[in-house]
Amino acid sequence: MSADLFRLDGRSVLVTGGGSGIGQRLAAGLAEYGADVSVVDLPAQDEGSATTVARVRELGRRAVSIPADVTDPDSVAMIAGEEWKPKVEGFRDQTPMGRLGTPDDLVGPTIFLASDASAYLTGMDLLAEGGFTSW
Ligand SMILES: NC(=O)c1ccc[n+]([C@@H]2O[C@H](COP(=O)([O-])OP(=O)(O)OC[C@H]3O[C@@H](n4cnc5c(N)ncnc54)[C@H](O)[C@@H]3O)[C@@H](O)[C@H]2O)c1
């Protein structure tokens, strides 16, 4: 198998959460293999996004930072085109609780897992997704 099979020259990728952690590393990894990168992250993460953009450019690829919230249908339409807006709305509409999750929704489950309330728990999937996977 040719190593060129893995090359991404001429491709443009969009990395959500690209201003930190996994997204930041993946943006650089994709650039190492030849891709140009659009870094999407929340406006509050501007500094991290700028670091990612700089790293991609150091690797000789083009990069741009797009401050946006991917849970906002209008932002997604702005980034990816109007045809994506219904997909975000559809995700929300297919969630039995009728809304997308927020960071606040993860506090209770985290307390549960960290406390004696889960003392005899050694492993499980704890779904905090408004019932989305119940369909
Ligand atoms: N790090 C791990 O070991 C691990 C393991 C399994 C799953 N995950 C999941 O993978 C994801 C990324 O993990 P990470 O460690 O890189 O986290 P991280 O917090 O370092 O990065 C997440 C990035 O996403 C951005 N973000 C959050 N909400 C956003 C929104 N609505 N629109 C645009 N950007 C948004 C944040 O600003 C942040 O920069 C998380 O959902 C995490 O729960 C991480």
Image (cartoon, helix red, strand yellow):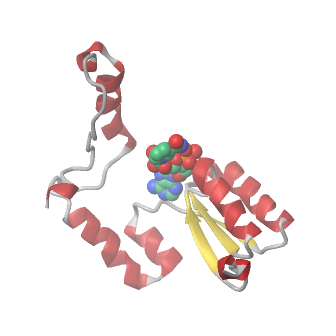
Residue 93 as seen in the image, left or right of residue 36: left
Q: Position of residue 130 (x, y in %)?
A: 21, 50
Quadrant of image for the N terminus:
bottom right
Quadrant of the rendered structure where residue 77 is? Answer: bottom left
Does residue 11 show up? Answer: yes
Residue 128 as seen in the image, left or right of residue 77: left
Residue at point 45%, 71% (across, down) = 76
Q: Position of residue 88 (x, y in %)?
A: 34, 69
Q: In the displayed image of the protein, which residue is found farthest to the top?
A: 116
| Placement of 4 over or under 102, stated as above or below | below
Q: Nearer the viewer, residue 113 or 94?
A: 113
Residue at point 80%, 60% (across, down) = 54
| Placement of 64 over or under 11, stated as above or below | above
Residue 107 as seen in the image, left or right of residue 33: left
Residue at point 59%, 51% (across, down) = 22
Does residue 98 show up? Answer: no
Quadrant of the rendered structure where residue 96 is? Answer: bottom left
| Placement of 120 over or under 101, stated as above or below | above
Residue 133 as seen in the image, left or right of residue 83: left
Q: Nearer the viewer, residue 55 or 32?
A: 32
Q: In the displayed image of the protein, which residue is found farthest to the front?
A: 1
Q: Position of residue 105 (x, y in %)?
A: 31, 39
Total labels drawn: 0
Quadrant of image for the C terminus:
bottom left
| Placement of 13 over or under 128, stated as above or below | below
Quadrant of the rendered structure where residue 13 is? Answer: bottom right
